[in-house]
């Protein structure tokens, strides 16, 4: 089973703190030779009490996590003001994590921050834990907000942290990369839950970049890549870079149907058609990052679509949705071109009744208006309807009328000389002749 980032962080924390403090000593240090600068001395903590030193070393060298946790608890209780209190708490935090005791691990991280509010390991653990809680649906809003706070605090702390005594340069760089992934991912996730898309993009992109630097094919990168795609695609206007990342998320999730469906929807909405989506999925499967020249052509603007429609189709054969597109989005000359052809034209059509009186019908004639249950056509009847013939709201009717005027925004087509068209009655079934005996 692969270790999580937070497990590796605590393992490195244990490695850093595993260097024993200076033992009590009466041996004087070597003096600098005349004319020479004194060699730099490491900033190492020194325990002056031999009993305290032996107690700490015994706990440090205990191999059994359960016994080690108890040993450090005893040490901290006996020496609450020890110079190595923070180191002991870090070791205790790592021991509880090895035991799988999440509650005590988190509690100990809080104790570490009471000693040092900028302790990078404790901040990393809490940022990771709060994000995981939100992802699991446990107080999601609160945990997401706290994940963002710990993430932002952690990024400030890691930028100012010095290499611990006893940790190699390579391990220190690895440690900084791993905590930066946790901090950026947690801060970005929290921002996304708050619909702060700009910060979500910034932090999550940093986390994804750091993951790729460590392992370009890391399957766990989906945890940051999918929310990164959402941060780009849910913003207004959408950033087409998100189309690449949602395709990459689909690849890492073995083409999870929900991710693929969402990605194709966003791609089609931006591009104007699904053409090219399958190719993008294939490309993202074989590459961890978008190419430098990545781009998706946007769909034509509504005004461009209106002009193309007006140039390619006779206005008298258009449906109400096409009229609405042109008369609400087209340029003045395009609108006039179509309106001159349909004004006063007797038009039969089907519509949903929103409201009705004997002299006026408020109708939904386009698919969008029907779905939203709002009127986009007003018909003034040629003569008052008999009271019994007034249609009811929600009823689907057949009507004919003449376009007379319109308003572009919000769109409303005014029609006159309206008449209801009776639906043809069903023919009664033919009677069968009686069977002959």
Image (cartoon, grey):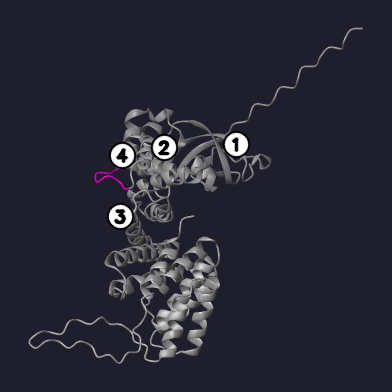
Label 1: which secondary element: strand
- Residue at point 9% right, 88% down? 34
Label 4: which secondary element: helix
Q: Which residues are magenta?
A: 289-296
Q: Is residue 117 magenta?
A: no
Q: Nearer the viewer, mark 2 or mark 4?
A: 4
Residue at label 2?
323
**Vertical order, 48 against 268 (above or below):** below
CB under 8 Å between callouts 1 and 4?
A: no
Q: Is residue 290 magenta?
A: yes
Q: How many marks?
A: 4
The circle drawn on residue 166 is none
The circle drawn on residue 397 is 1
Count neighbours of disc 2 (C-alpha within 10 A) and say few if under 14, some if 14 to 19, many if 20 or more.
Answer: many
Q: CA distance from mark 2 to mark 4?
A: 14 Å
> Residue 350 is drawn in which quadrant?
top right
Q: CA distance from mark 1 to mark 4?
A: 33 Å
Q: Nearer the viewer, residue 348 or 26?
A: 26
Query: Is tag 4's residue or tag 3's residue first in the polypeptide sequence?
Result: 3
Q: Nearer the viewer, mark 4 or mark 3?
A: 3
Query: Is tag 2's residue or tag 3's residue first in the polypeptide sequence?
Result: 3
Q: Nearer the viewer, mark 3 or mark 1?
A: 3
Give coordinates of residue 207: x percent, y percent: 35, 59
Label 2: which secondary element: helix
Residue at label 4?
304
Query: Is tag 2's residue or tag 4's residue first in the polypeptide sequence?
Result: 4
The circle drawn on residue 213 is 3
């Amino acid at each position: 089973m692969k270790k999580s980032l937070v497990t590796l962080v605590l393992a490195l924390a244990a490695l850093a703190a595993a260097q024993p403090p200076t033992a009590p000593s009466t041996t004087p240090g070597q003096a600098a030779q005349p004319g020479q600068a004194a060699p730099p001395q490491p900033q190492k903590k020194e325990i002056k009490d031999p009993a305290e030193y032996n107690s700490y070393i015994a706990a440090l060298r205990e191999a059994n996590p359960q016994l080690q946790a108890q040993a450090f608890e005893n040490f901290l209780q006996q020496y609450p003001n020890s110079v190595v209190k923070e180191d002991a708490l870090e070791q205790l935090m790592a021991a509880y994590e090895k035991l799988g005791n999440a509650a005590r691990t988190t509690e100990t991280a809080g104790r570490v921050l009471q000693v040092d509010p900028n302790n990078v390991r404790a901040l990393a653990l809490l940022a990771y834990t709060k994000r995981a809680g939100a992802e699991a649906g446990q107080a999601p809003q609160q945990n997401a907000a706290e994940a963002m706070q710990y993430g932002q605090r952690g990024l400030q702390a890691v930028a100012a942290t010095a290499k611990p005594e006893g940790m190699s340069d390579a391990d220190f760089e690895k440690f900084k990369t791993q905590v930066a992934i946790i901090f950026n991912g947690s801060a970005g996730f929290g921002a996304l839950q708050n619909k702060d898309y700009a910060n979500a993009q910034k932090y999550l992109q940093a986390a994804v970049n750091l993951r790729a630097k460590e392992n370009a094919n890391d399957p766990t990168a989906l945890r940051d890549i999918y929310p990164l795609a959402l941060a780009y695609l849910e913003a207004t206007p959408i950033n087409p870079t998100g189309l690449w990342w949602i395709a990459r998320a689909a690849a890492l999730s073995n083409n999870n149907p929900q991710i693929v469906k969402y990605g194709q929807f966003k791609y089609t909405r931006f591009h104007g058609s699904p053409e090219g989506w399958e190719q993008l999925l294939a490309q993202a499967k074989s590459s961890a990052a978008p190419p430098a020249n990545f781009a998706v052509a946007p769909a034509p603007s509504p005004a461009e679509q209106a002009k193309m429609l007006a140039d390619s189709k006779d206005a008298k054969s258009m449906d109400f949705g096409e009229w609405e597109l042109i008369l609400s989005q087209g340029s003045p000359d395009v609108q006039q071109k179509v309106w001159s052809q349909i004004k006063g034209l007797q038009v039969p059509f089907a519509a949903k009744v929103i409201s009705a009186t004997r002299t006026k019908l408020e109708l939904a004639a386009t698919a969008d208006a029907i779905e939203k249950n709002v009127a986009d056509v007003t018909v003034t009847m040629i003569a008052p309807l008999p009271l019994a013939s007034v249609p009811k709201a929600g009823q689907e009717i057949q009507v004919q009328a003449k376009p007379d005027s319109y308003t572009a925004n919000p769109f409303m087509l005014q029609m006159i000389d309206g008449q209801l068209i009776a639906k043809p009655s069903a023919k009664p079934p033919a009677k069968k002749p009686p069977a002959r005996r």
